[in-house]
Amino acid sequence: MTLEQDILSRRTFAIISHPDAGKTTITEKLLLFGGAIRDAGTVKGKKSGKFATSDWMEIEKQRGISVTSSVMQFDYSGCRVNILDTPGHQDFSEDTYRTLMAVDSAVMVVDAAKGIEAQTLKLFKVCKMRGIPIFTFINKLDRQGKEPLELIEELEEVLGISAFPMNWPIGMGKEFLGIYDRYNNRIEQFRTEEADRYLPLNEEGALAVEHPMKVTSYYTQAIDDIELLNEAGNQYSEEKIRRGELTPVFFGSALTNFGVQTFLDTYLKFAPVPQPRITEDEQFIDPVEHSEFSGFIFKIQANMNPAHRDRIAFVRIVSGKFERGMNMTLARTSKSFKVTQSTQFLADDRETVDEAVAGDIIGLYDTGTYQIGDTVVGGKKTFNFEKLPQFTPEIFMRVSAKNVMKGKQFQKGVLQLVQEGAIQYFKTLHTEEVILGAVGQLQFEVFQHRMNNEYNVEVTMEPIGSKIARWIENEEDVKDSMHSQRSMLVRDRFDNKVFLFENEFAMRWFSEKNENIQLYSLL
C-alpha cells in the first residue's frame, strides 16, 4: 500500500457517554469483531473474575468504571480502527476533553431508558465545538426504555442536532424482536441463529417473506413509525454528517451483542479519514500532503506496567509516517532524539510498533521529557499544534506524606501523577506546602489510591474546600502582602503565581481594591 492509501484506511474515534450507558461493553464487542479479543468480559462480570479489557487500572476493576482513556487498535473490513475509550465519570472530563482533541469522530452511547444525561451533554458540547462528526448508538433495547420517537426528539431538542435513524427497533425489552434496518433494507432479528438472522424487505419497505413477526403489533408499529420518518423525518446527508450537524442513529443492545456489527459496518463507510490539524500560527497540517512526520501528545500515563514503573506519552500522529529508530524533535525544547522504544495498545497489552501513520495513536516511553500538549516532528522545521485545553480546578486539598521519611517517593509520585494532567499542582509561597486542585472529588480518591499502590506512599489529605483559582497576567505587579486567608497566593507547577479565592465575593473585593491586577481563568 502507498502511504496515502495507508493513511486513508485509518478511522480514529472516541466513545463518549454518561457512566453506565454501556460504553465499555460496546468497546469490548467492537474489539471482538476486530478479532482483537476472543472473549468479551463485560464490566458487570466482576464475580466471574472477568474484567473488561479496556479497564486496566486496579481502581477501575474494583469499581467498574473507566478513569483513564484506553487506546485500542484492530483491523476490520479493510480499515485500521483506533478506538479511544474515554472516562465516563464527570470528574475526569478534562482527560476526556483532551482525548476528543485526538480523534476524528465520536460515537455517543445513549441508554434507551435514561435518554440524554448530564455527562453526555457536556461531552457532546465539546464535540460540537470542534465540529466532530457524531454517530449515536442507542443501547439497552433488550430492556424496557423510552419510546424510540421520544428518544429521537430528545436527541434533537437537548443536543440541538438533527438525527437520522439508520435503523428502528421492533418492540422493546422482553418484546424486543429486532431492528428494521433502513440503510441495508432488511430486518435483523433478535436472538436468532446467524443463518436466519436477516429478513428481506420488498420495494414498499414491508417484509418480503411470510413470517410470524408480521402479525405482531410491534411490527405494525415499527412500519407506521418508518412511514412517518420517511415522510416527515430529516433527509439523509453525508455532508451534514461530516460537519457534525446530523447524527446517524443506530439502535441495539451491546450486552447481547445485537446491532453492534451492523453499526460498525455502516460507521466505517461514513466515518471521516484522518483530518488536518491547525498549528498555533494557523497553518493547516494535512495528513497526506504534509509528508513529514508530526504529532502531538494528548495524554501521559504513569505505571501502566507496575512491574516496570514506566510512563507512556500517547501521541496522535497528524501527518506522515512514524518509523521506530527515526529521529524526532520536541518543538518546545528544539531537542532531537532517536526513538527506539515505541508501543501500540490493546488496553494494557502492548506490542512494539515499528511503523505507524497519520491517524494512529502510538505510545512513546517517557523519562519525564514530555508534557501534555507537546508537538513532536520528524523534520528539521518545527512548529506547534494549537494548545490543548486545561480546566480551572474547583476543589483543593492540602497533601503530605504520612511518613516524613518517604518525602522523596512522595515528591516523585506527586510530580508524575500531576504530569498526567488529571490533577493540578500548587505550592504555598513560603512554607512550600503541596496543594492539589482537581475538577472533581473522584480524582483525589484515584490519586490517593495510586500513591499507595504504585509509589508505596500513604498520604494525608486535608480538604481546603472549593476555591476560585485565577492566574495573573501582570505577575510583576503582585505583592506578597496581597496574600490573605481569603485570597491565598500560591505558585503552580510552572512557577506562575495563582490566587485561590474563598468565593465570588472575596474575588470581587480583591479586584475592587487592586484594579491594576489582571486575573484570568483557564477553561
Image (cartoon, rainbow, N blue to C red):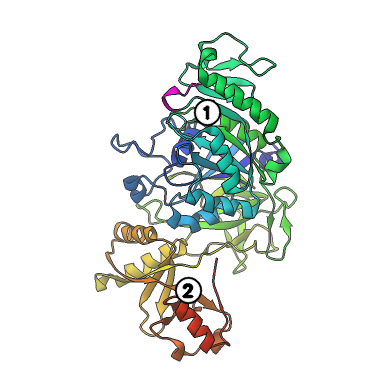
Corner quadrant of residue 148: top right
The answer to whether residue 515 is seen in the rendering is: yes
Residue 242, image x, y percentages: 69, 43
Query: Disc 1 and disc 2: Cα gap in Å?
Result: 46 Å
Type of residue at label 1?
A: Gly
Corner quadrant of residue 126: bottom right
Question: Measuring 51% from the left and 41% from the top, which residue is drawn there?
Answer: 109
Q: Main secondary structure of the magenta part?
A: helix
Type of residue at label 2?
A: Ala
The answer to whether residue 183 is seen in the rendering is: no
Q: Nearer the viewer, residue 280 or 117?
A: 117
Question: Measuring 47% from the left and 16% from the top, which residue is drawn there?
Answer: 193
Residue 36, image x, y percentages: 48, 34
Look at the numbered disc 2 and give the secondary structure of its residue.
Answer: strand
Q: Nearer the viewer, residue 121 or 271?
A: 121
Corner quadrant of residue 205: top right
Instruction: Indicate whether 516 appears above or below 305.
Output: below
Question: Measuring 34% from the left and 52% from the top, which residue is drawn there?
Answer: 307
The residue that disc 1 covers is: 259
Residue 161, image x, y percentages: 63, 45
Question: Measuring 52% from the left and 28% from the top, which residue is drawn there?
Answer: 259
Mark 2, residues whose alpha carbon is within 10 Å: few (<14), some, or many (≥20)? many
Magenta residues (range): 173-177
The residue that disc 2 covers is: 469
Look at the numbered disc 1 and give the secondary structure of its residue.
Answer: loop
Sequence order check, earlier mark of 1 and 2: 1
